Image (cartoon, coloured by chain):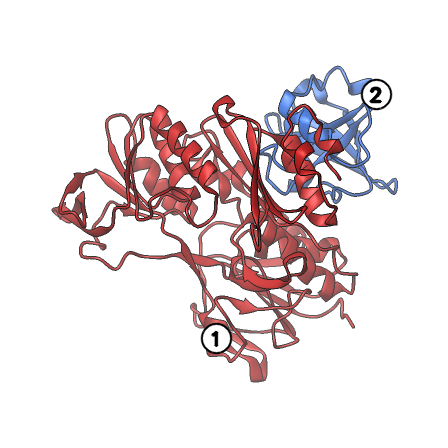
Amino acid sequence: MAKITYIEHDGTEHVVDVKTGLTVMEGAVKNNVPGIDADCGGACACATCHVYVDEAWKDKTGESSAMEESMLDFAENVEPNSRLSCQIKVSDALDGLIVRLPESQH
Amino acid sequence: MSDLGANVVILGAGHAGGTAAALLRQYGHAGPISLIGDEPLAPYQRPPLSKAWLKGEADADSLALKPLEFYAEHQIDFRPNIRALKLRRSDKVVELSDGSSLSYDILILATGARAIKLPVPGADLAGLLELRTAADAEALKAAVGPGKRLAVVGGGYIGLEVAASGRALGAEVVVIERESRLLARVACEALSSFFRGVHETHGVIFEMGASVTGFVGENGHVTGVTLADGRTLPCDAAVIGVGATPNDELAAESGLETARGVVVDLEARTSDPSIFAIGDVAHRPMPIYDRMFRMESVPNALEQAKQAASAITGRPAPAGEVPWQWSDQYDLKLQIAGYAFDTDEVLLRGDPASGKFAVFHLKGDQIQSVEAINSPPEFMMGKQLIGNRKPVSKAKLSDLSVSMKEVVA
């Protein structure tokens, strides 16, 4: 279990407990956190679960795969700390993780 | 004109219906919401059924769109195992299969589509399966395994995904397709032959241009598929994936306008202003192609759920989308954007032999659709270009050394 803070573009914070093994995307979707669309349900096919990982957590969330990089390269408003949240698996090590959401996923 | 206190009834608890219910609450709808589904499960994702779920890599919890508690927490009255029998528009009531009836201020039809059955002898034998629901997938999972012989009737996306999963589970798989090529209805020649090659490499046998005339069985269970040329292919189970037909009878019987699906406008509203139709059941306008049609895809279900929820809560309609879909087979990711309407040229980017390429369908110098295999840049950029209608340079588009960011003419 990890406590994850999702911060919407307008500053609204959502703090939810996410089970180990789920992804950061699933943690948002299953808790009805707005701002992560995840149209493809986690197949790394749509780039609509884009998040900005808080700098302090960049190393712990790991490296993105070539597929993810390539999808992100064409998403809107990409920053060096951009990730697709369906590709970040939740573990105890991510307890306290903070991610910020872009203005739009489309 | 919206009424955040309106009584909303949603018929169909699939991806479209479930998403509409959640979005209504997210958009501030305060009135009652009833979500009526004919399956035992709360809304779940169907795409993994033919892939991760079949291979045992996903369970019911991970498939669920939302945890079951979500519905009670958000005052959504989710009722499983119930179907609607009749829609009485004159007094705004739906009659349900449990004998009760529900009145509504606003009704959302999200009744989906059902698998087409083959009208041939033996079609009622046990071991003949389809793949629409988690229960179907459960039956299929039990029927495939090492040494089992699986016949797949229909070489479309569902058939091919099942074939790939069947091989991964060790089953012998034969795909029977009526047309002379795979994916004949939905993909181009280059893609058809590419997929055939990949599946053959993985040991799938193909019977092309073959019509199924019946099924034979022993003790009520299927043992073979009979073809028009007289041969019988032995099998332990068969999956029928020959397309789907919209569940639009309720709408049609109540006098709503239908045309291979329930006709809706850009807000997903039907010919009755109190009734919306979303997802597989809707026949909807698609302005970028200047026509109306029906789609069976998750992105379409989500988009229309957004349209309906926005209209009901008085939000501006979402910006027009570019339709898209995806398919995973073996280690291949196929991403498709748009539809190849009114095209005059097919352009290949990359070499199919490399397992990484894209096929662009052009109308003049505009992209109408793209089919991308393991090629996210081609998909992502292609999708944007389909939406913004920017003309492209064909020379650049077919030249792999030119980045997709620079193909605009």
* Residue occupying the point 67% across, 43% down: B383
Q: Position of residue A31 (x, y in %)?
A: 68, 41
Provide the secondary structure element on which disc 2 rests.
helix
* Chain letter behind tag 2: A
Residue matched to label 1:
B252
Say above or below: B47 vs A24. below
Q: Position of residue A17 (x, y in %)?
A: 69, 32
Instruction: Determine which of the numbered discs, if any, sits on residue A55 in the image.
Output: 2
Chain coloured blue in the rendered structure? A
Residue at the top extreme, as displayed: A59
Tag in front: 2 or 1: 1
Q: Quadrant of residue A32?
A: top right
Q: What amino acid is labelled 1 in the image?
A: Ala
Image side of residue B362 versus residue A79, left or right:
left
Quadrant for the C terminus of chain B, please: top right
Q: Nearer the viewer, residue B5 or B409?
A: B409
Quadrant for the N terminus of chain B, please: bottom right
Q: What amino acid is labelled 2 in the image?
A: Glu
Q: Quadrant of residue A78?
A: top right
Chain coloured red in the rendered structure? B
